[in-house]
Amino acid sequence: MSATSTPLAKIIFLMMLLSSVGTFAFLIYRRVKVLSFAKPINRFDRVGERIKGIFVYYLGQKKILDPKHIGPGIMHAFIFWGFLAVSINTIHLIGRAFIEGFHLPLFGPEGILGMPYIFIRDLFEVMVFVMVLVAAFRRIFIKPERLTLSWDAALILTLIGTLMVTDFIANGAETAIHGKTAEAASFMATFMSHLFLGWQLSTATLATLHHVSWWVHMAALLFFLAYLPISKHFHVVTSIFNVFFRNLEPSALPHLDLEDENLEHFGASQIEHLDWKDLLDVYTCTECGRCQDACPAYASKKPLSPKRFNEHLREHLFEKTDWLLKHGGQPESAEAFDGPALVGEVIQDETIWACTTCRACEEACPLLIEFVDRFVEMRRYLVLEESRMPDELVTIYKNLENSGNPWGIAPDDRENWTEGLDVPRIRDLSEPVEYVYFVGCAGAFDQQAQKTMQAMVKILNAAGVNYAILGKEETCTGDPARRSGNEYLYQMMAEQNIETLNSKSFKKVITSCPHCYNTIKNEYPQLGGNYEVVHHTEVIADLISEGKIKLTNAVNETITFHDSCYLGRHNNIYEPPREILEAIPGIKLEEMPRSRNKGFCCGAGGGRMWLEENKPRVNQLRVDEAATTNAKTVCTACPFCSIMISDGIKETGREEQLNTLDVAQVVVQAME
């Protein structure tokens, strides 16, 4: 009993179908064309790994089903899986509008997949409908802070629910009229038919019910298709591509070729200055708010919500689409865009400077959206083109340029921390060494961080490791300059270090600072500096496992470990520090509620170490969390984390409750 049994009905449906598909294709063309105007990047390598990601993150919904958000995750996953399962049914319904009994191969009444599919379809349709009700209940009554109520979300939920209900009704009415049909395996059709027959509906009424349900179903489906490209639910289309084109490279900011004479701008002052994956990210954001939940800037009441950041960019991109399409890839020769400026108006300066580059938002995002690069590109524009930056950064840049460190301390003092220790300098050695110990600015100049370096030297000496330091030949890696947008200063400092390292004979670089680790390992290759880099916790863990150092003294204490963002989320090093602590007699390791890849930032990254901030400070929030454990010591593996946690302990008045030590310091306690 087809709802399009007459020629007129077929014509009307064909016009609806062509209008919907045409609108969808036209809007998709506009979206893709805009991507072509953005900065090019290569995301077509390592195809096998990218395809694997589709199975893990797209089909498997791995990040959606995060344990922290398992309830909403299950809800969304079932809606997604339901859509995939019902898509075959949608093809059948459209085909049967023109060809009676149409079905895909193997999915017919006699096909091997026919009956099993109908049962699976029903199962998922029921689950989708239930999850839609759950989603509506959460938005109306529970109202999680991270979710924004909107008519767009309400419309989409209504459309999804309508698709499920109308399918139930249409199949039930058909079964009630004809009895055993192709829908014999459909438990929902059987249930609905019994319901209708129990109501003693006439055949004419059932036929009308079937036809109306079918047309409402198709109207909802075709409207949904045409509406998707202008909705936040465009991620239904883009998410598979966003997963495929995810960043597979190490944690490194995009290289800016300052010697390129054709370079027309520094960073991003216009949305088309971002790369095409950045714009695909903007299209793909689901506004789920998980990034906002994870963001330390948002938690400490800074003017930054990663979710709103994406929303503002998308609204701006939609507003600028006509202008971009009109002027193509040559906007510099066109009249100015008559709309708000990207930097300063769409995205406020205060928002751009609030980011700690900790990547908590990227870790939380179920669709692998990248945030940090976009913030840094806007910072590059502010610093290199506008010289518009917080006053504190002006001082830091001068210190880096004149003294080679953010503190502005004389470079000749870089070796003062070694006083009283046997520390080999590579300049004094005639033979190659296995390790260059890159101390870093904090390790050389901050009194608290110096204790970590001194402990590390004792460990290396006790284990008989063949190492040396650069000492006065070392300068800042440039990390604070690069992450705050001063690419020119970063490259100047990086090239100086690369020249120094390339003139030495060694196998590996040891760093105690995760920022130094990340910069030398992942970013120096952009400038020709390729080195094998290990963090000091990796070295210590190996020395313990090889029996080269003995941990004989019990350290009877409960310790909690704070994960450095640049060691953890940026470089996936979580276990070595914990393996070390667990190997020390007497230590009880108690994790904070947020740890490992869900760890909470100390607030120092992205140049924020040097910027003033209002209360509550990020480091204070982290100390508050540490205080909820039974630990007496907050153990770190990063000098900047150590400084920030120590300051947070003092600022919150917890000196008698907590103290801060680096992993290396605890190891020395167990050795001596």
Image (spheres, rainbow, N blue to C red):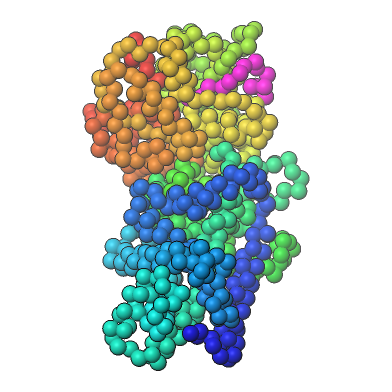
Q: What's the residue at 47%, 51% (across, down)?
A: 60
Please say if 191 is above or below 70. Answer: below
Residue 190 image offset from top left, x and y in percent: 35, 75
314 on left or right of 488: left
Please say if 544 is above or below 324. Answer: above
Name the residue nearer the viewer: 354 or 464: 464
Q: What's the residue at 55%, 65% (across, down)?
A: 106
Q: Residue furthest right?
A: 261
Name the residue nearer the viewer: 397 or 441: 441
Q: Is residue 566 visible from the viewing direction of this image?
A: no
501 drawn magenta? yes
Q: Which residues are magenta?
A: 499-512
Q: What's the residue at 60%, 35% (across, down)?
A: 523
Q: How many marks?
A: 0
Residue 473 image offset from top left, x and y in percent: 60, 19
Q: Quadrant of residue 342?
A: bottom right
